[in-house]
Amino acid sequence: MLSAAKRCFSTTRFNPYKVTVLGAGGGIGQPLSLLLKLNQKVTDLRLYDLKGAPGVAADLSHIPTNSVVKGFAPDNNGLQEALKGTEVVLIPAGVPRKPGMTRDDLFSINASIVRDLAAACAENAPDAAILVISNPVNSTVPIVSQVLKSKGVYNPKKLFGVTTLDVIRASRFISEVAKTNPTQEKVTVIGGHSGITIIPLISQTKHKNMDTAARDALINRIQFGGDEVVKAKNGAGSATLSMAQAGARFANSVLQGLDGESDVIEPAFVDSPLYKSEGIEFFASPVKLGPHGVEKIYSIGELSSEEEELLAKCKETLKKNIEKGVKFVTEA
Ligand SMILES: NC(=O)c1ccc[n+]([C@@H]2O[C@H](COP(=O)([O-])OP(=O)(O)OC[C@H]3O[C@@H](n4cnc5c(N)ncnc54)[C@H](O)[C@@H]3O)[C@@H](O)[C@H]2O)c1
Ligand SMILES: O=C(O)C[C@H](O)C(=O)O
C-alpha cells in the first residue's frame, strides 16, 4: 500500500520543458546538468559546450528519469540544434577566477563568449528564458540584453542574472552565526553579484538585533563568499558545486513560474524599475516568477541606515558595471 505522500507523488503530472545548458562540460555545467536531469519538469535536456558535452550527456542519459538528454558540439550546427525551440537556457560558459582576480577581470574573455551565445539564443530560441551565470554577472546580463535588443527580440521579463548563490550563502552563513537551522533562514539579498554590490538585508531577518561586529563580519562574508572558494581551490577555479545547486534551484523556480504555479518568488538580477531613474537598468531584488517570466518586482522595503550606506556604494559600482556591458555591445 502506498503512503499518502507517495500516492500524491505518483499521480503528479508535470508539463514537459526543454532546457539547454551552454557550457555544460565545465565545472558548473556538469553538476548543474545532473541536477536538471533529476528535475521532473525537464523532459528534454540539451547540453552544449566547446568540448565534452556529448560525453556528459551520454553519462547522464543512463539515469532513469523522465527526460531525454542530448549532447552537442560546435560541429554540425551543434549550438543551433541545442537551442532550437528550447524554453529555458542556462549559461555557465566562460572562464572562472583565480586567486587575486576580481570578477571584473573576467570581462575581457567572458564578454565575447556571452555576446556570441546570446546572439545564438536570439536567432534560435527568441522566446526562451535566459539565465546568465557567467561572470561578471553585473556586466554579462546587460551584454545579453543589448544583443537581444539589437536582434529585436529582447523580452525583459525573460532575462535573469543568477544571484541565487548569494542567497544560499546568506542562509548558510547566518545560521552558522545564530546557531540555527540553515533551511529555515531566509535572507533577502539585493544589488548585484560581486563584492560590495551584494547586499544582504540582515535588518529584515529575525536576527536584526545581532551584535554589530558579528553583523558586519557576516555581511562581509556574504559579499566575499566567492573569494573563500577561489582561495581554497588555489587556482583550480571558483564555486562549482554550490553554484550548480543554486542554478538548479533558480531554474526550477523559473520552470515553476512558467508552469503557472503561484507565489514563486526568488531574488534575481533583472531589468528593474527600482533605480532606473538613477541610470541603473538592472538590479537584484525578490522577483515573482510566472508563466511569462518576471511577473512582479518587489521593492526592497525598509533598510537600516547601514544598509542605506551599503546601497549607495553598491549603486555606484553597479552603474559602472552595467555601462561597461552595454558599451561592449553598442560601441563594438
Ligand atoms: N553567477 C554566479 O553566482 C557564479 C558562480 C560561480 C561561477 N560563476 C561563473 O561561471 C562561469 C563558469 O565557471 P566554471 O567554474 O564552470 O568554469 P569552467 O572553466 O569549469 O567551465 C566553463 C565551460 O565553459 C565552456 N565554454 C567556454 N566558451 C564557450 C563557448 N563559447 N560556448 C560553450 N561553452 C564554452 C568551457 O569549454 C568550459 O567547459 C565563470 O565565468 C564563473 O565566474 C558564476
Ligand atoms: O567568486 C566567483 O568568481 C564565482 C562566483 O561568482 C561566486 O560567487 O562564487
Image: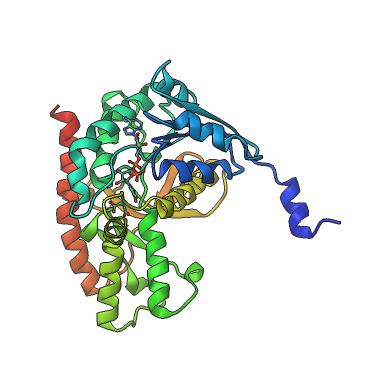
Residue 1 drawn above or below residue 152: below
Using the image as rendered, state which of residue 301 and residue 104 is in the foreground. 104
Taking the view exactly as shown, the residue that stands out farthest to the top is: 76
Please say whether residue 108 is visible from this viewpoint.
yes
Q: Name the residue: 26% across, 81% down.
A: 212
Please say whether residue 45 is visible from this viewpoint.
no
On screen, residue 12 versus residue 327, left or right, reads right
Using the image as rendered, state which of residue 187 and residue 40 is in the foreground. 40
On screen, residue 25 versus residue 201, left or right, reads right
Count of number-bearing discs? 0
- The quarter of the picture where residue 61 lies is top right
What colour scheme does the image use?
rainbow
Residue 116 drawn above or below residue 299: above
Q: Name the residue: 78% across, 53% down.
A: 7
Q: Name the residue: 58% across, 45% down.
A: 38
Residue 130 percent across, percent down from the top left: 39, 37
On screen, residue 180 versus residue 8, left or right, reads left
Taking the view exactly as shown, the residue that stands out farthest to the right is: 1
Q: Name the residue: 18% across, 54% down.
A: 100
Using the image as rendered, state which of residue 145 and residue 168 is in the foreground. 168
Quarter of the figure with the N terminus: bottom right
Residue 8 percent across, percent down from the top left: 74, 53
- The quarter of the picture where residue 203 lies is bottom left
On screen, residue 254 versus residue 224, left or right, reads right
Residue 150 percent across, percent down from the top left: 26, 25
Quarter of the figure with the C terminus: top left
Using the image as rendered, state which of residue 180 and residue 281 is in the foreground. 180
Residue 23 percent across, percent down from the top left: 38, 35
Residue 154 drawn above or below residue 3: above
